[in-house]
Image (spheres, grey):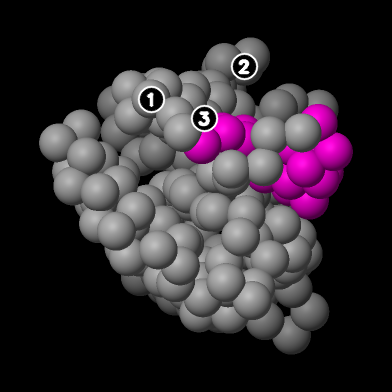
Amino acid sequence: MTPRLLIIDDDPGITAALSRGLALHGYDTEAENRADRGLARLTAESFTGVICDVMLGADNGVELVRAARAAGVDVPIVMLSALSDVDHRAAGLEAGADDYIVKPFSFDELVARIRVQEKRVRDSRPTPATLSATDRSLCSAKVDITLTEREFALLHILVAHAGRPLSRGWIFDTLWAAEGSGTENVVDVYIGYLRKKLAGHDVGFEIRTQRNKGFCLDGLAPVLT
């Protein structure tokens, strides 16, 4: 996926130059010249990073960064500024910026700093477990759990619908009804079996019960292999 950056700067010449240069390094860019528009896009769209000037006409880039972090925006933010004193740099970093570059700057340095932030995000991202149909195993970096055929089938549909609660009746109809016997209570029994096998292991997720809705995988869903 091509990295997508949002440039927030009130100088169209700077945004155009940054966009052209970043395109040569494999980035897609979008630009905004006002803090309110930049914040609206950050909270509504998906970007891999942000380049934000400190001075945005009547607006303040530092306050924009603070508002973005308060709104839950967690992508890397690199601030640009002609203000080089320690207090201004500290203000930007304390507001939530990941880096601060003083103008004038080398374009190669900007790209290098953006890539450092991208690597930091990659390195901090947890690795999902794998759920393998070949040997009915659930494997993470720390554990390898073998499942029975029915435990695997149950976990598989929870993974396939990760984040959505599945009702007891729907699970029963999917996995057991064709056998023509049993009751919906069998779902609770096998949910219990799975929870017992997962207990105490770091697999990145857990199986939650949502009242009046059913069962739901909560956390980082395994990769199906």
Crowding at label 3, few (<14), some or many (≥20) Cα neighbours within 10 Å? many
- As helix, strand or loop, the secondary structure at mark 3 comes to helix
- Tell me what residue is drawn at x 55 percent, y 25 percent: 120
Q: Is residue 89 above or below residue 206?
A: above
Horizontal side of 191 relative to 7 (left or right) equals: right
Rendered-image quadrant of the N terminus: top left
Q: Is residue 72 visible?
A: no
Q: CA distance from mark 1 to mark 2?
A: 46 Å
- Tell me what residue is drawn at x 25 percent, y 57 percent: 16
- Closest to the camera, between mark 3 and mark 2, is 3
Of 125 and 91, which appears nearest the observer?
Answer: 91
- Closest to the camera, between mark 1 and mark 2, is 1
Residue 50: where, in percent of width, then height? 48, 51
Q: CA distance from mark 3 to mark 2?
A: 30 Å
User: Mark 3 is on which residue type?
Assistant: Gln
Q: Which numbered marker is on residue 143?
A: 2
**Mark 1 or 2, nearer chain start:** 1
Magenta-span inclusion, residue 203: no
**Mark 3 or 1, nearer chain start:** 1
The span picked out in magenta is 86-103
Crowding at label 2, few (<14), some or many (≥20) Cα neighbours within 10 Å? few
Of 35 and 82, which appears nearest the observer?
Answer: 82
Of 61 and 23, which appears nearest the observer?
Answer: 61
Residue highlighted by disc 3: 117
Q: Is residue 220 above or below residue 213?
A: above
- Tell me what residue is drawn at x 41 percent, y 70 percent: 32
User: Mark 2 is on which residue type?
Assistant: Val
Q: Is residue 59 visible?
A: yes
**Mark 3 or 2, nearer chain start:** 3
Rendered-image quadrant of the C terminus: top left
- Tell me what residue is drawn at x 85 percent, y 38 percent: 87
